[in-house]
Amino acid sequence: MLAPASLRSPAAAGLTALFLGLGACAPAAEPQGARAACERTAFPDDPAISVAFTDRYNGRYWNNEEQVTVWREGQRLFIGAPPRERVQLQRSAAGGGEGNFRDGCGTTYQFILPPDGPGGYVVVTEPNGARSEWHRRV
């Protein structure tokens, strides 16, 4: 599985389309302009996105050889593949847990952490139902 469409370089996005036969994060019929607009969605500051709450999710996550990074800036949480684009995440009540987030395109991010320390992973579910798991390497 590959990174959400917004987190890949244009070349990688083209390869994904070849392998998966779809636009990854968005249905194939969605115009590219609409996809780019939702990727740039800026959510308001969220006081709950603080050191104590979100810094446990920060770090690098891998899916085979691809990687994404999760980090906090003030009261906002981001995921991306630096130095490329980044996508802001917003807390989500869907899924019933505190590690649930979504982006402006409807992709969901469920962070699963072990009870006893580092590790963990994030499950990324695209609006079209495609899922991928991204694991931290400790």
Image: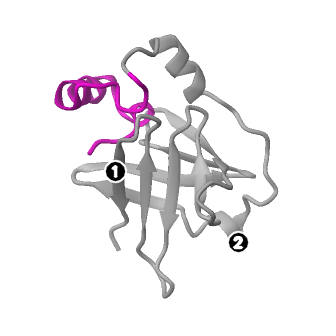
| 107 to the left or right of 47 | left
Q: Amino acid at mark 2?
A: Ala
Residue under label 1, please give it: 132
Query: Which quadrant: the C terminus?
Result: bottom left
Kindly give the residue lying farthest to the bottom in the view shown: 116
Residue occupying image coordinates x 25% and y 30% = 16
Check the image and tell me how it is coloured: one colour
Dot 2 or dot 1, earlier in sequence: 2
Query: Which quadrant: the N terminus?
Result: top left
Distance of label 2 from label 1 (alpha carbons): 27 Å
Residue 60, compared with residue 85, is above or below; it is below
Residue occupying image coordinates x 51% and y 40% = 107
Residue 39, compared with residue 71, is above or below; it is above
Q: Secondary structure at mark 2?
A: helix
Residue under label 2, please give it: 52
- Segment tinted magenta in the rendering: 1-27
Residue occupying image coordinates x 37% and y 66% = 136
Q: Is residue 20 magenta?
A: yes
Residue 137 occupies quadrant: bottom left
- Circle 1 Cα neighbour tier, 10 Å, few/some/many (<14 / 14–19 / ≥20): some
Q: Is residue 26 magenta?
A: yes
Q: Position of residue 65 (x, y in %)?
A: 22, 50
